[in-house]
Each structure stands twice: as C-alpha cells, then as structure tokens.
Amino acid sequence: MIQSINKFQGYFLLLTFTLLASCGGGGENTTTASQEQIVITVPRYFVPSFSQINFPWGAISIADFNNDQIDELLGTQSTANGFISLTESDLDLTNLRAGRAYRDIRFADFNNDGLLDAIANVYTEDPAEGYIQLYWGMEGGKFEMDVDFAANKFQGYGETIVVADFDNDNYLDIFIPQYKTATREISRNLLFKNLKNKQFEEVAVTAGVAVGLQTNPEGAQAVDYNQDGLIDLYASGSLFKNNGNLNFSDVTVAVGLPGVFDEGAKFFDQNNDGVLDLIIHNPAYGPRIFLGGLNGKFTELTGIFPSEFFAASYGINVGDVNGDSFDDILIAGGLAVGGAAAAPRLWLYKDGKYQSEFLIKPGLGWSDLVSFGDLDNNGSLDIVLRYGKNQILLNNDLPLKYIKLDIRSGDLKNQQGRVVKVHLPDGKVKAVVVDGGSGYMSNQPYALLVPNNFNSEIFFEIFCGNKVVKMSAYDGSYIVDCGLF
C-alpha cells in the first residue's frame, strides 16, 4: 500500500549569514535561540544556522523525535522561529553522559509502540565508566532507562551502532561493533536479537559476526546489498552476508572487498547505475570507493578524488547536497599539516570526479563526525558537523520538487537497510538505502529524500523483504507499506 501524506512545508529559511546560538550552558530548562553576527564563510548554498551547546559531545543522531514529520538533531527542536536547544534533562537522558564513556547512540522503535527508543554504547572496559544502556521512549518525547538491561553490564570499546530487522520477524535487532581485546570474552562485536516484550539476547558468536577481518571496527552499516530480502551487515572491515535464521557468512574476499581498517564506511550508488557501491575512509589516507557490479563483485574506482592531506580524519558521509541526483562526500577535518585542527571538507561530484568546495573556516575546534538531514523540511539536505560543537548548516539550494518515502512494515518504521531503486527521467537508476546507522557514529533520517529537478515523475522500486513494491511520484511525501513478514 502506498499512502500520500501532507507535505510539511519548511518552517523557515535563513537567507542571511547569521548564526543561531543557544544561550546558557546546559541549564535544566529549555533554552531559547539568539542571533549574533557571524564570520564563517560557506558555499553559496549553505547558511550557518545553529551551534548546539547542550549535547556538545557524542554521536550525531537525526530522527523525527516528536512525530511531526520533521527530522531533528538530537537535542534540538524546530519551531516557527528557528531551532531551540534542549538539555539532557528535558529528555530524561541525564544519565547518558554522566559517569559514562559515552560513544554512540541510535534511535529506533524496538518494541513497536510507535515511539522512538534508544541504545547507547560506551568506549571503555572500566566498570567505573559505565555500561551499554537501553532506553524506552515515553509519551512527550522523554526516555526511560531499562535498568534490567543495564544490569547485564555489557561494555567494550564501542563504535558505530546499527539497527535492522536481521531475521525478518518485524522487530529491530541491534548490532554494536567493538574492539576485540584480551580483557574479556565479551570484548568483541555484539549482536542483540530482539526477543520482543522488551527483551534481547546477545547472539554475535552463533550468528558469525563477533569478529571481522579487522579487530578494531569503526564504521558500520546494515544493508541488503544483494537485494535478496535479508539485511546484511558491514563492520570490522568485513561484509557479512545474511544467510537467514540469523546466520551470517563473511564474504569480503569473495566479493572483492579489501578487508581494511576504516574510520567510516557507507554503501551508496556512486555512479547511478542501480548497484550499490562502498566508500571506506582511512583517517590517514582518505577515502576509497569500490564499485559494485551486476556479478556481485566489487572493483576499486581510482583517480576521481582531489589530492588533499589527511591525518586523524574520523568520519565520512554521503548525500546529494545540490540536487543533481549524484551523491557528494562530506569528510571530517581531522588535523591539518603541522598538527592544527582542520575544518570539515565537502567534495562535490561533477563531470565524473569530485571537486573540493570550501565549506567552513578552520579554527573552530576539533572536527570529526559528519552527517546530512533535511532539518528545515524544504527538500534539500542540510549538513551537521561535530566541529567544536554540533553545527547545523542549512542548505538553501532548493530543488524544483522533492519526494519523501517513508518505508514501513504495516505501521512500523522497521525497514532499516532496505534498498530502493530510483529510476530517474534521464535514464539513470540510483540505489538508496533506508538508514539505521552508517558512516561513522551517525544516523541519517529514516525517510528517504529524493530531490526532483526533472519536469516529470520518478519511478521507484522498493525492495521489501519478500516482494518489490513499485510506484511513481512527482512531488510529495508517501508512506510505503512493505507488509508484515
């Protein structure tokens, strides 16, 4: 079933170079936004908009936290007057960072009640620095920690959390990649099977995903890379093929992938041929792209990146920021030559290669995590950077029209990792993925955003677990029901 829903128009668009910065420094009440002059220079279509202060460290999570069909950055809320900043107390997440080596957090509906829940890992094996915590969403946008789950005392050097329904039972499972150490047996990747009724079982060893080719995982993603209806998994330098019954095989070498260390990885369609490709990012050497083929094999694509210096660059993401249907690349700054903190960088795809576009001036602090999301709901991808603080850059390069697809199973938002093929009027076919965590410690919006700068409809194929749903659209927001499995 395909259901058209009302498109929520963008609340506002800043057309001047201003910065909305939260007042205060982590007080208990919601803070308001104030306007101050800015000296940041950005490309012609990005507007520095908001500097978040109350969730200053930790992952970048973007989701529709209040079910208003508009995505928000964790710790912010959209209003008619712009963004306001929320505190951890506002969300009942005061124990998220306090006393914990907080690392990543992922939001999804784990108990199928229509409310977002959360899973948050740690980067430690020290009991004094906390454990992996599970939170249940409550009415009013608040969260309640599951004390029984916390009592299991799961720990480890955790990285990018991903969620997906790996066994097609309509309940989301949780994968947490962790460093393999000699300290404890549990210091490895963790896979939590959703037993329903708010219960989980850790099954990574029996599932075959406990350790990959690289023992220090960073980036991760859940994706049905071969469109067989089963959600596969990339982590620890390995591509784990889902064989069904929550059993995986490491097919990295067989499909031609290098099995190397990364500080961010993501499947996307680099050349709009309808086949998913893979970008992996080395913090000292930069990104590499491996093109997927119709034969299921990957081959490296070379000679398309600008020559730039990389050091300690932790984070990468992709998205179509200018509406030309080709994805662009956003990369963490890391360190510049000489050791100073470098600004994040944006590479636009043009004429078969990527070109570096000046994004934001250096000197604002450390730069690592990067992500995209349409935070003002106007059809263009905005940029979120962990650059000193979490920074939001609004995109004012608006498409002619845009389509948003909300892929569901019944009423459930549990189709993370599913692939949609977008048949464009110019003859290209672009494969896109419902995100459940990807890149490096980032979560892009659940709904898929497809800009339409063509004067005609776009045809879609949605690869559900047991069928392909087809539809066409020119403009608007749609709920697509994959059905219950």
Image (spheres, rainbow, N blue to C red):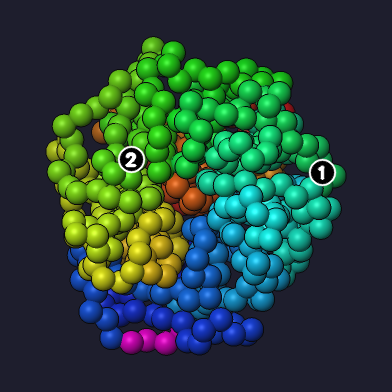
On screen, residue 397 versus residue 193, left or right, reads left
Q: Which residues are magenta?
A: 32-36
Q: Is residue 33 magenta?
A: yes
Q: Is residue 471 visible?
A: no
Q: Residue at x 18, y 56 (%)?
A: 337
Q: Residue at x 57, y 36 (%)?
A: 180
Q: Earlier in the sequence, mark 1 or mark 2?
A: 1
When the figure is inspected, residue 231 is found, relative to residue 159, above or below; the finding is: above
Apparent side of residue 433 relative to residue 13 in the rendered image (left or right): right
Check the image and report above or below for 142 versus 380.
below
Mark 1 highlights which residue?
199
Residue found farthest to the front: 182
Element carrying mark 2 = strand
Q: CA distance from mark 1 to mark 2?
A: 37 Å
Residue 349 horizontal/vertical position (percent): 22, 43
To which quarter of the image does residue 485 belong?
Answer: top right
Task: Using the rendered image of the protein, determine whether residue 37 is visible from the camera's viewpoint.
Answer: yes
Q: What amino acid is at disc 1? A: Gln
Badge 1 crowding class, 10 Å Cα cut-off, few under 14, some 14 to 19, many 20 or more, is: few
Residue on which the image places disc 2 = 282
372 relative to 229 in the view: left or right: left
State yes or no: residue 436 in magenta: no
